[in-house]
Image (cartoon, rainbow, N blue to C red):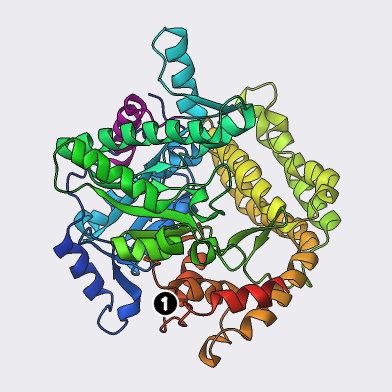
Amino acid sequence: MSARGGRVACSRAVTEQATETATQRYARRHGAEARPWAYRALGRTGLVVSALGFGGYRIDADREEHGLALRKAVREGVNLLDTSTNYTDGGSERAIGHALIDLAKEGVARDEIVVVSKVGYVQGGNLEIAQAREREGRPFQDMVRYAEGCWHCIHPDFIADQLGRSLARLGLARLDVELLHDPEYMLMDADHRGGMTLARRREEFDRRVKLAFGRLEEERDAGRIAWYGVSSNSFVVPRDAPEATSLAHVLELAEEVARERRRSSHGFAVAQLPMNLLERGAALEKSGPGDATTLEVARRARIGVLVNRPLNAFSDGHLVRLADFPDPRGASSIADAAAAVTALEDEFATTIAPALDKSDASSLFAWGDELLANADRFDDVLHWRQVEADYIRPRVEHVMRHVSLHLVGRVRNDWTAWLARYQPALEKLLRAVEARTLPAARERSAALHEQLERQVPQAWRSRSLSQMALGLLLGTPGVTCVLAGMRREAWVDDGLGALERAPPEAGATWSSMAASLDG
């Protein structure tokens, strides 16, 4: 198995697993006695985890800033790390694996850290593996071909295959928690294709989930996982939605598996779901017995609840970032910043590129012209940031690594000096493009901030919008850990700021917030 720009797995396996004693020790070391709200029991696992977790979506082992942010988070009190097999095509798991080894050298023990991963999506390299198996006549069974480039599978054979790959990328002998990742894809696909009644779809869903739970129980017996559960976006939708899943129901399926295997208990202990200020289904939708909400079901069953997308909300078909945005005034003009970048790129083409002995070397850097020509395409800051993070920065960093590997002698010194001037110039251009997209986002953010200040206690009103949004989730009964995307060290600081004081008690406020925020 090949790696994307780095090690396939860590140089040595970290064999320990998270333990009750070690996670308690970690919590005490980071002030749990003074801040009891900052650390919580992860359901019935016995493990103690930080109320703020590190969300590994879009984290990549090839991005140095991601590794710095990850290690900073763990050093400063975050001991739950969440990832998945499909996040950055395995790069997220590799980043966590690398960080665990680096942190162990600093004295942060592996058994203090809870690592959660997920299985189900068949994308990128995993899709290539699945397609190769089909050509060889040994396909994974129960494959959901949801869309081109996005398949899904929770068949036992696929789970076993993916768990092995996850452990290799993470450098672990045992995973603390393995979650089925959005198993409702089977329901959505069947609904889209038609030809199967809703009752029949649900019977098939139950069959597949039970098979998956059976495999996960076997993996517990084999020592490759400690606990398991389900991550589902559909835990929070109305119960009559075609794709709806019920935490109470999947728990019943786990109990059936345990009875069929003549076991007194099962290993289902963790659920993951989306929740934020604008998506409140976990606290409001009646999905369980006696009209219990998903969070109420979790509390009664002692299930640890991990909340994802706390700051990225979908509202009326649009993605809304629940955070404050900087004032764009004072940013460079795009034209001026692009001209400076283009001049440096022309200098590279004439003085450094010839030494690379590559026909297209002179065009390796062409961001000045490209961004100047396309800046008007970005009218939303979230769209721009996604393009910057997923397209521009990876390409720039790939080219920088390539050039650095192929230059020696005096021209390498010229390259280093040029790069020291080019990187800040390019950063200024990126920020200039972003500044153009900010006014609309700032207006939405300011309005939401003003509304939210009326919902939180006085002590929380001086906080950033993101900290208030995190704080209300942290103060919601039934929520164990809120997974924040903290790809930058500054975002780690902002997230941890939400733990500095006791969170507002949000259990009775979600309905009133719904009326206020939606109005």
Residue 439 vs residue 10, the one in the foreground: 439
The residue under the point 15% across, 38% down is: 221
Q: How many marks?
A: 1
The residue under the point 74% across, 55% down is: 429
User: In the rendering, at what x and y percent does residue 286 appear?
Assistant: 50, 61
Against 422, residue 44 (above or below) is below
The residue under the point 32% across, 47% down is: 252
User: In the rendering, at what x and y percent does residue 307 appear?
Assistant: 45, 60
Q: Is residue 306 left or right of residue 112?
A: right
Residue 499, can we see it?
yes
> Residue 300: which quarter of the image?
bottom left
Q: What stretch is highlighted in magenta?
A: 153-171
Against 428, residue 255 (above or below) is above
Q: In this view, does 244 lie to the left or right of 156?
A: right
Report which residue position mark 1 lands on: 499
Residue 338 vs residue 449, the one in the foreground: 449
Helix, strand or loop: magenta stretch: helix
Q: Does the magenta stretch include residue 154?
A: yes
Against 66, residue 14 (above or below) is above
Q: Which amino acid, by three-letter code, is at mark 1?
A: Leu
Residue 318 vs residue 415, the one in the foreground: 318
Residue 64 vs residue 31, the one in the foreground: 31
The residue under the point 44% across, 20% down is: 129
Q: How crowded is mark 1: few (under 14 residues within 10 Å), some or many (20 or more)?
A: many
